[in-house]
Amino acid sequence: MTVLVLTRPLDATSDLVISELHERGVPVCRLDPGDFPSCLSFGARIGPGAGHWAGTLRGQHRDLTLGEVSAVYYRRPSAFRMHPGMAGGDTRWARAEARAGFKGLLSSLDCRWVNHPSRNAHAEIKPVSLATAARCGLDVPETLITNDPAEAREFVEALPGGTAAYKALGPGGPTTDDGNAHALWTTQVRAEEITDAVSLTAHLFQQWVPKAYEVRVTAVGRRLFAAEIHAGSDAARIDFRTDYDSLTYRPCTLPGEVTAGMHWLLDALQLRYAACDFLVSQDDGRWFLCDVNPNGQWGFVPELREPITEALADLLEGKCS
């Protein structure tokens, strides 16, 4: 049986897991769906009495029979690259057909997924993940989603300290004319800084929690790996992704209620893997969950890189649930 890894060509995180699986003698096939249809083709059939599609994926380096796949590691596949000679409307149609056909076929595989793309997509919806976390007993900061500037100002003004964190609701950020997206980092905002431009789309404002540090909790099956993240610059204290070089890490133990809440959260969202970010209040040590990343990075914490790699390999190999 073969572990299918779906990711782009340059993905150091997948490289770690693939190397571990190779060392264990587990067959691995790495494919990038973005290679379809130029360098990747397929054919699959189903008929009366069949409970699954039968067929073959034909890549640049090897072929893979669908029936061989025992687990799928869905990491960071790139977007479909359609033929450059197509017109704009034809390109959009062909890309939609690729999603429905090629991605749809992969999504139908009845095997162990880490994670299934439909579960990732569901968990990435912030209103869903925050409400689910709260139902699972985890503390979430006071949060408002709105396109009403007056309501946003009123909410922020009433918060302790009169300050909120403004965050993007979805992955990525605004897109430039050439199609490149730039990151939208977390920012601090006060009521008087909120303009009527808020009315143009949905915005998320979240209670600003003065923190002692952050904690990245990485869940692999039923195993939880946690590390304190201590910011060494003003920028990193607002959003640690802006200055990784200033960060220091320290593996830590989770409070019992956070451990229980994390297990309930993964069960509720039907995830086998997630990376969740917590703010630990400097006032009372209270843990606030602020983000659920169903496909988040984990290799940046040196002390946890090897154990998380091994845990993911165990999960894909079927050694744990």
Image: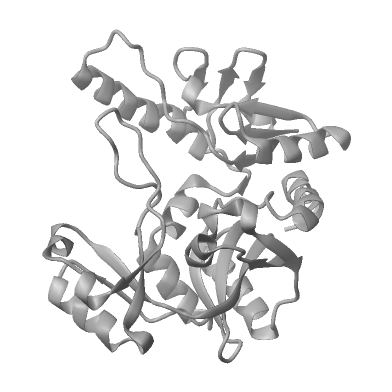
Q: Quadrant of the C terminus?
A: bottom right
- The number of callouts visible is 0
What residue is at 51 percent from the left and 13 percent from the top?
Answer: 39
Report the residue that reaches farthest toward the top.
85
100 up-or-down from 135: above or below: above
User: Horizontal and vertical percent for residue 166?
Assistant: 34, 66
Q: Nearer the viewer, residue 278 or 188?
A: 188
Q: Nearer the viewer, residue 282 or 199?
A: 282
Hey, which quadrant is residue 152 in on the image? bottom left
Hey, which quadrant is residue 70 in on the image? top right
User: Horizontal and vertical percent for residue 6?
Assistant: 58, 33
What residue is at 66 percent from the left and 13 percent from the top?
Answer: 61
Q: Is residue 186 left or right of residue 93?
A: right
Q: Is residue 222 visible?
A: no
Report the residue that reaches farthest toward the bottom.
284
Q: Is residue 280 left or right of residue 193?
A: right
User: Horizontal and vertical percent for residue 251?
Assistant: 76, 67
200 up-or-down from 76: above or below: below
196 up-or-down from 181: above or below: below
Q: Is residue 162 left or right of residue 61?
A: left
User: Horizontal and vertical percent for residue 74?
Assistant: 58, 41
What residue is at 14 percent from the left and 60 percent from the top?
Answer: 197
What residue is at 63 percent from the left and 65 percent from the top?
Answer: 216
Q: Quadrant of the N terminus?
A: top right
Please, which colouring scheme is shown?
one colour
17 up-or-down from 207: above or below: above
Q: Is residue 73 visible?
A: yes
Report the residue that reaches farthest toward the right.
24
Q: Nearer the viewer, residue 281 or 75?
A: 281
